[in-house]
């Protein structure tokens, strides 16, 4: 049995011409294994050791890293985990290396590190041989090789979906903001709705489903702080961004 921790809550937001890249990071922890699902972007790199320390872990204690896809905001810190085995979808790996048009969200440095790491490529669907309690599901659209991971505890299915569903709005509407194929993304969202009770999107907090419909979402907000001596909006030193609730 794993304890599930959302160690960094992703957030959907961007500036006019810049993606903020706040991707979700989850930890599955048992007496035998410590599994990380995605590693976040370079902006959180210096803080990851502190986040792990809350669970009495260091970066060297992470045994396995499951990557939903290879974009910078989800695979940006792979090199922090020198002892980990990395799991990537086989189709995602070949997409990253053989694409005719370069995906600018995939960083060459991360690919180089993974090429020399303990890397295991998984097929589209099914069990992971050395992780019998976790299953992989191919959920393409955002990228061709995106993989979601399902952990079942009793009758409850927890799903970690990366950017197959970035936030509560995409889950409810079935429409995604960034996809290589909108119809494929919509089909992936339908599969996800049928496969889990709780899901952690790539850029949002936990969402609770019943019979494929959203019934509850954890609050999600970020506090923006400004540098010493700086204020904004008539003297404010910080701004709180909050995702509103959506009724499924």
Image: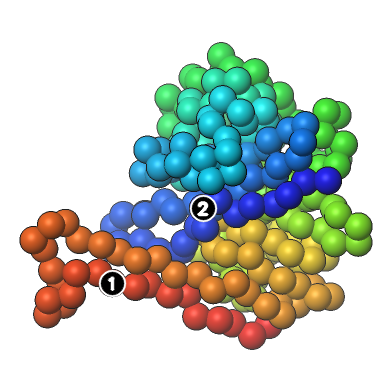
Instruction: Using the image as rendered, state which of residue 153 and residue 68 is in the foreground.
Output: 153
Q: Is residue 179 above or below residue 198?
A: above
Residue 230 as seen in the image, left or right of residue 164:
left
Q: Residue 53: x and y, percent? A: 51, 40
Comparing 113 with 232, the one in front is 232
Position in image of residue 41 (x %, y %)? 43, 43
Q: Is residue 215 left or right of residue 14?
A: right
Label of residue 239 in the image:
1
Q: Position of residue 88 (x, y in %)?
A: 66, 32
If you read the primary sequence from the N terminus, does the residue marked by circle 1 or circle 2 appear first?
2
Q: Secondary structure at mark 2?
A: strand
Residue beneath the point at 91% across and 61% down: 155
Q: What count of labels does the image hold?
A: 2
Quadrant of the frame with the C terminus? bottom right
* Residue 165, picture quadrant: bottom right
Callout 1–callout 2 Cβ contact below 8 Å: no
Q: Nearer the viewer, residue 5 or 121?
A: 5
Residue 145 quadrant: top right
Q: Seen in the image, is 69 located left or right of residue 244?
A: right
Residue at 61% x, 59% y is 201
**Mark 2 = which residue?**
8
**Badge 1 element:** strand
The image shows residue 173, relative to residue 179, as above or below, that is: below
**Residue closest to the far left:** 229
Image colouring? rainbow
Label placed on residue 141: none
Residue lying at 68% horizontally and 37% vertically, measured from the top left: 35
């Amino acid at each position: 049995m794993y304890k599930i921790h959302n160690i960094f809550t992703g957030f959907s937001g961007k500036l006019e011409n810049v993606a903020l890249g706040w991707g979700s990071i989850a930890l599955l922890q048992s007496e035998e294994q410590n599994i990380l699902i995605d590693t976040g972007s370079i902006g959180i790199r210096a803080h990851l050791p502190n986040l792990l320390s809350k669970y009495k872990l260091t970066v060297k204690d992470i045994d396995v890293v499951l990557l939903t896809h290879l974009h910078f905001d989800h695979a940006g810190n792979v090199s922090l985990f020198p002892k980990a085995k990395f799991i990537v979808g086989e189709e995602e790996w070949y997409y990253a290396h053989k694409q005719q048009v370069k995906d600018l969200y995939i960083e060459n440095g991360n690919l180089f590190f993974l090429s020399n790491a303990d890397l295991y490529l998984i097929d589209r669907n099914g069990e992971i041989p050395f992780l019998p309690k976790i299953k992989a599901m191919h959920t393409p659209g955002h990228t061709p090789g995106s993989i979601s991971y399902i952990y079942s505890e009793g009758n409850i299915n927890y799903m970690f979906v990366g950017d197959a569903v970035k936030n509560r709005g995409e889950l409810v509407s079935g429409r995604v903001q960034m996809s290589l194929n909108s119809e494929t993304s919509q089909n992936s969202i339908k599969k996800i709705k049928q496969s889990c009770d709780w899901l952690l999107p790539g850029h949002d907090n936990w969402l609770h489903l019943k019979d494929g419909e959203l019934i509850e979402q954890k609050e999600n907000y970020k506090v923006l702080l400004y540098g010493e001596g700086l204020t904004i909006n008539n003297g404010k030193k910080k701004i709180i961004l909050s995702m509103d609730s959506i009724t499924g």
